[in-house]
Amino acid sequence: MFPVIQMFDGMLCENNLKALYIYASNQKLMRTIVSYLTLLFWLFFTGISLSAQDSSIESFPVRGLCLEAPRPDRVSDFVRFIDEELASQKVNTLILRVDWNYQYKSHPELKDDIALSENDVKQLLKVCQKHDINLIPQINLLGHQSWASKAYKLITVYPEFDETPNVIMPEEYEWPNDDGLYCKSYCPLHPEVHEVVFALVDEICNVFEASHFHAGMDEVFYIGDDNCPRCGGKDKAELFAGEVNKIRNHLAIKNRTLMIWGDRLLDGKATGMGMWEASMNNTHRAIDMIAKDVFICDWHYERAEQSAVYFAMKGFNVATCPYNKSTVAMEQIDDMIHYRKNANPELLPRYQGIIQTIWSGAGSFLNRYYQYKENPENRTGSVGCTISVFERFSENQ
């Protein structure tokens, strides 16, 4: 009748058993005691303790940095930075925005005039492997096909891929403008665009020996344009989700994980986050249409928004991404510690950690990093924030 007590018969003396039966004369109390003894028995034989979940920064699966890939003349400096700085600061993830800064063999017409060689990338990869740093390439897909007055390689070489060919790049850019131009997008429904971009993705992932690929996909303002013969009138959320899933499915063939920025999956109006850190063109509903193994990089720069909880509860792995305000970054790190400390076992592994972001060139970043490191009192902006984040990564918990 009481199998657990029978199991413990050799551990409990006869007098204690009699006392237990008398004390537990009512059935409800006996069930409570049996449950308690069962738990003790299970813990004893499995060696599992009831200690609190390790929520220290050192336990974060991802302690990352995302910045532009170096130009060829700064590769040796960047190798030194990885070897001496990132490794000592316990950074374990490095995302490099490559875009057109690589000598592509599949589409050489899309490389920048000065671009990284395969040997350059292998130097970066070697030092990352030495320190168990996951090196991840990024090419901006869908959005960010232009900046200010400059159209980037993809839609310059293949203008037929442009979602809004009617919008002419201005000689002098300003925001806001009558065209609503921030950055150009390619048309996700163009029948030939993926043949080109997937060739680039495969090539860069192969040379990086990458397990992950970052597709960007942030700040997509041009999508489903009314003048596009393929996208006009279509649901913007479905278009965005379709592109995410298409990229994800292509990567999954070789067991690679897709990473994207999370802003287009947040409702800018309902959350009050607005058009930059969230969506005001109805792409936010795509969050319920995309594969759950897409890794979300949740960037917020002005304040420590709590949207990582939303992404985790929707089933996604998520990392919070600071930028240029050290006070905000420290709050974001504290929040991630709090999430991991208090999450249930299902949600816990989805809170992946922190990825610091830098939006200047790699060369200028390196110059300022070493200047600021030597002069702590002058730490400001994104580089000062980066150093503060690194100090939190490496502090003893």
Image (cartoon, rainbow, N blue to C red):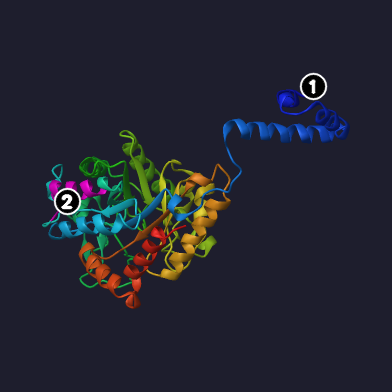
Q: Is residue 333 above or below residue 3?
A: below
Q: Is residue 163 above or below residue 193?
A: below
Residue nearest the observer in this picture, 158 or 372: 372
Quarter of the picture containing the N terminus is top right
Residue nearest the observer in this picture, 359 or 339: 339
Percent coordinates x, y for residue 149 in the rendering: 22, 67
Q: Residue at x 83, y 32 (%)?
A: 20
Q: Quadrant of residue 175?
A: bottom left
Q: Secondary structure at mark 2?
A: loop
* Label 2, residues with CA under 10 Å away: few <14, some 14-19, many ≥20: many
**What label sits on residue 1 in the rendered view?**
1
The reply, left or right, for residue 246 in relation to residue 11 is left
Q: Is 245 covered by the magenta stretch?
A: no
Query: Where is mark 2, residue-wise?
Result: 102
Residue type highlighted by circle 2: Tyr
Residue bounds of the magenta highlight? 115-128
